[in-house]
Amino acid sequence: MDDIAGIIEGRIPERVTLRVRSLTPYTSEFTSEQIDLLADIAEKYGAGYVHVTPRQTVEIPHVERSYINEIVKRLHEMGLSPGSTDRYLRNVIACSRWCLFNAYPMTGIAEVLNREFADRKFPGKVDISLSGCDFSCVRSRTSDIGVIARADVEITDRKCKKCSLCIKEPLGCQVDAIEITDYGVEIDRQRCIRCGFCTNVCRPGSLVVRSRGFDIYLGGRGGLKPREATYAGSVNGEDQLIDAIKRILDIYMENAMEGERLSDLIERQGDAILEVCK
Ligand code: SF4
Ligand code: SF4
Ligand code: SF4
């Protein structure tokens, strides 16, 4: 059989595990029709159940190997694709579009990166994780390339009505960075995680988003040799972020030795690679 991304040898002879990602309409989101198809494939060719992986893909275990080409054709017709295994780019993951904390919705960027790089093989494992805010629910700081969206908030001269919505549960600041004083509102910049959430509830416009952008972290990893990623720089727009990630992947492709991850390359060559994000 050809080298097909998404095929993992199974525990039963002549049966494999099929790892599937969603490419349409949005990365890591599955429509009801797509879920129906996955259920049908699991029922007809597998064991009747699936597993959802930490990288937001679905694994169908115990699939009969002889049916793989037929199954892959059906997946492609429905906007799904086998992948995210071995040295193929691991599924680029992002926060859900509906989380209220998103300083910036990241699914569109994940979709672009998955489409462009899903079928490319790299020297080692590469995972990219895009968080909508500093809570980093998709583990941006332990990924090879991690991104955290930021919304810088400014205090305007519009009078604070002291409604307290920006500090009260459930819609207020989650990290207690805001204080309402006799003179108006104050933000503790050391505590503020730049999510921009407070601006959503401030009706008078005393708090507004001044700018949005992305912090980039490189060289993180989990597993046997966990390593926290290093902050490498910030960019302002989606195009700049995608360009920066492409440059990082190119440098990694050109310089990494067989089996090396980005963290290994950074440790071997020093921090110069981090300059690409500046
Ligand atoms: S990292 Fe922030 S935006 Fe993303 S899911 Fe967590 S809380 Fe929501
Ligand atoms: S003060 Fe900072 S952390 Fe708190 S809600 Fe506003 S932007 Fe988010
Ligand atoms: S800053 Fe805005 S949301 Fe917060 S107390 Fe003042 S008016 Fe209300």
Image (cartoon, rainbow, N blue to C red):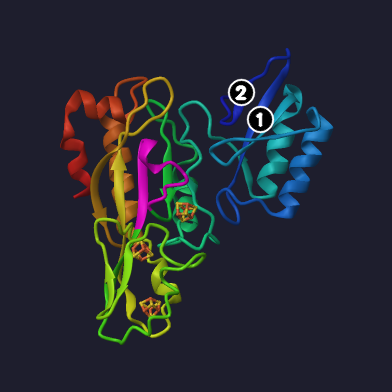
Disc 2 + disc 1, Cβ < 8 Å: yes
Task: State the image coordinates of residue 65 (x, y, percent, origin top left).
Answer: 72, 22
Task: State the image coordinates of residue 172 (x, y, percent, origin top left).
Answer: 44, 67
Residue at 40% over, 70% down? 198
Q: Secondary structure under badge 1?
A: strand
Amino acid type, mark 2: Ile
Asked whether 107 or 184 is in front, the reply is 184
Label 2 crowd (10 A; few <14 / some 14-19 / many >=20): some
Residue range of the region highlighted in magenta in the rendering:
134-149
Residue 8 tag number: 2
Residue labelled with disc 1: 18
Label 1 crowd (10 A; few <14 / some 14-19 / many >=20): many
Residue 1 visible, this angle: no
Q: Vertical placement of 100 versus 94: above or below?
A: below
Amino acid type, mark 1: Leu
Q: Vertical placement of 37 versus 161: above or below?
A: above
Q: Earlier in the sequence, mark 2 or mark 1?
A: 2
Residue 88 visible, this angle: yes
